[in-house]
Amino acid sequence: MRSVRPPSPDQHRDSDHGAHTLRVWEGTITGLYGDDVFVELGPRMQGVVPVRRFARPPRVGDVAEFTLGGREDGLWALHLCSEESLALWEDLDEGCLVSARVSREVSGGLELKVGPLHAFLPRSASGLPRGKPLAPLVGRELVCEVVEVERERQRVVLSRKLVADRERVSDHQRELSALACGRVVEGHVVRVEDYGVFVRFGRGMEGLVHVSNLTHERVRHPADVVAVGDALRARVLRVREGGARIELGCKQLEQDPWAVVAGVLEPGEIVGGRVTRLAEFGAFVRVEPGVEGLVHAGETGLGPGRSLRAHLPPGREVRVRVLAVDAAAERLSLSLLYAGGGTIDPEGDEGPCDAALSGELGSRGARGGIDLKGLLERAFERALEERDEELRGEED
């Protein structure tokens, strides 16, 4: 009988179970007070049993096997497994579990025997799908719950369905208790809402992936990324309200693009990007998948009265200069201007330049960008210095 797995004790009602349940719990004696022996059965699960039930005086630290009775004030009434087993129908209580053998099929259900006693199992309580025959159960030993006891008529009514349902609940609770934060789960999308998607996984568990945790890319609506029925892998972020609310994240299983950018982008570097959206204070530009930076209005090169939307519509390809990178805060400051103030050519065309600048232009590197105005100013200064040197030589 110890293979039976009835519901977790917390799933039982507080006082509706009798002395004879088939689930065996191993417990450790933690205290002796008067006629009571207190037993630890597991985390947040304690019970008490009268000292007279023991064949020899119990001691703290002893381990024994128990079955559960009712519960009162948070303590379970326990029974030693070595006590005399259920034999007479007078010992039956509503809510206790019994082992019964199906003797025959009768009108409306099955007739069973619990030891020497006869019991009735209604078809609706058999646990079988509607329309499935009962005959295959004849001769089998079933674990059932007592749902009705009529002592005057010596009539006992059993339910196999309640046991099966509670076992499923128990399995769910056990799986839920093992659902630690950080665990990776696999499931499928069952519902899509504006704020996120619900994913079903495990044995009927459901969690929410908030829209902000779907992907590192900016998502306007979850339906743009996933649909009902899609398979998803996600990481457990939080389990709240005893498992009633499970928060999941998909982007947590991807490489953080900001961690990559932190080691690649440097201030002063010029990179390509695409305008994604506009705000009153500037334009946002996507430079890498999942990485957007802000070009403040003052860094666009547009004078007063010139419309951002007209010159930087969403979707436009641009080249921008990196001003600052804060990967920890996921902030990237960008500019459409060279350090000297000239506007960066979105096509990357440097245009004509003086041959005297070619060495400096070539030394900038493929990703360094070209500050034409700054280069011209430095070339002009060198030309003035060379002329001054020639004039001083003539004077000498």
Image (tube, rainbow, N blue to C red):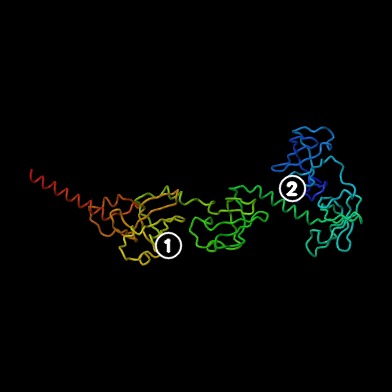
Question: Can you tell which quarter of the image residue 39 is in?
Answer: top right
Residue 394 or residue 208, whichever sits in front: 208
Mark 2 Cα within 10 Å, few/some/many (few <14, many 20+)?
A: some
Q: Which residue is drawn at 84% across and 38% down?
A: 53
Instruction: Give the farthest residue toward the left.
Output: 395
Name the residue: 16% across, 48% down.
386
Residue 359 lies left or right of residue 282; in this view the side is left
Q: What residue do we see at 85% from left, 52% from top?
A: 141
In percent of width and height, residue 337 lies at: 32, 57
Residue 126 position in % (x across, y down): 81, 59
Q: Residues within 10 Å of mark 1 (few under 14, many from 20)?
A: some
Please report contact status of discs 1 and 2: CB closer than 8 Å, yes or no.
Answer: no
Q: Mark 1 points at which residue?
A: 277
| Residue 84 placement (x, y as % from top left) | 87, 42
Q: Earlier in the sequence, mark 1 or mark 2?
A: 2
Task: Tell me which residue sits at (76%, 42%) in the image.
Answer: 47
| Whole-number angstrom distance, CA of label 1 to CA of label 2 | 55 Å
Asked whether residue 144 appears in the rendered view, the answer is: no
Identify which residue, 216 or 366, lies in the foreground: 216
The image's mark for residue 26 is none
Please tell me whether residue 392 is drawn above or below residue 203 in the rendered image. Answer: above
Provide the residue designation for mark 2: 9
* Residue 40 to residue 280: above or below: above
Amino acid at dot 2: Pro
| Secondary structure type for disc 2 | helix
Front-lying residue, 33 or 170: 33
Quadrant of the image for the C terminus? top left
Q: Is 114 on the left or on the right of 275, as rendered?
A: right
Type of the residue with mark 1: Arg
Pinpoint residue 56: horizontal percent, then vertical percent: 83, 33
